Amino acid sequence: MDDWRTDRIGAALRGANPTVLARLSSGFAVIGDTQFLPGYCVLLTDDPGINRLLDLPRAGRLAFLADMDLVGEAVQRVCARRDPAFRRVNYSILGNLDAYLHAHIHARYDWEPPDLVTGPVFSYPRATRLDPAAQLGPRHDDLRRELAAELHQLSGSPAPS
């Protein structure tokens, strides 16, 4: 496959998804493709056939939600250390565009525009969310390393080499 973005879960399972921060019990924590709100992460299921949370048995749902909480805690810890204007973490499981189970974990900040800070992240204009200046790149390497280290500490899994 030429582009890991066409099969994010398969690429993660093959070790070919460069956004993976950590392997968790229910899937993969990945750093978001856009960082207009620094710290944005996604939790991907490890089974591409799972479309919705309710497609999992109860134990699987609880594991996914526990991993979502763990990613949120890592985002909160890292973003609060990096930016005194860190405000909170928002969680969402939508699945309207990508037909596989995934959860969005967004850091929110006091510096956000007043008309957007109290609403859902997806209220931001598409141009802001897709701005080339906000796309994941080398300038996010330190953020990526900090998130990965925090996830590995919280999950008790070995840190990447």
Image (cartoon, helix red, strand yellow):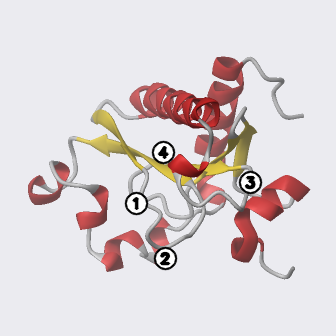
Residue sitting at 21 percent across and 41 percent down? 110
Question: On the rendered structure, is 11 left or right of 66?
Answer: right
Corner quadrant of residue 2: bottom right
Quarter the N terminus occupies: bottom right
Q: Which residue is mark 3?
A: 47
Residue 144 at what x, y percent from top left?
Answer: 64, 44
What type is the residue that disc 4 sits on? Answer: Gly
Alpha-carbon span between mark 4 and mark 2:
17 Å
What type is the residue that disc 3 sits on? Answer: Asp
Q: Are marks 2 and 3 in contact (CB under 8 Å)?
A: no
Residue 120 at what x, y percent from top left?
Answer: 25, 55
Secondary structure of residue under mark 1 = loop
Q: Which badge, 3 or 4, comes first in the chain's sequence? A: 4
Residue sitting at 56 percent across and 64 percent down? 33
Other-residue count near label 2 (Cα within 10 Å), few / some / many at <14 / 14–19 / ≥20? few
Residue 52 at what x, y percent from top left?
Answer: 53, 55
Question: On the rendered structure, is 143 left or right of 130?
Answer: right
Alpha-carbon span between mark 2 and mark 3:
30 Å
Q: Which badge, 1 or 2, comes first in the chain's sequence? A: 1
Q: Which residue is mark 4?
A: 39
Q: Which badge, 2 or 3, comes first in the chain's sequence? A: 3
Alpha-carbon span between mark 3 and mark 4:
24 Å
Q: Which badge, 4 or 2, comes first in the chain's sequence? A: 4
Residue 16 at what x, y percent from top left?
Answer: 85, 61
Other-residue count near label 3 (Cα within 10 Å), few / some / many at <14 / 14–19 / ≥20? some
Alpha-carbon span between mark 1 and mark 3:
28 Å
Which label belongs to residue 151?
A: none
Q: Which residue is mark 1?
A: 36
What type is the residue that disc 2 sits on? Answer: Pro
Residue sitting at 47 percent across and 33 percent down? 72
Which label belongs to residue 132?
A: 2
Q: Which badge, 1 or 3, comes first in the chain's sequence? A: 1
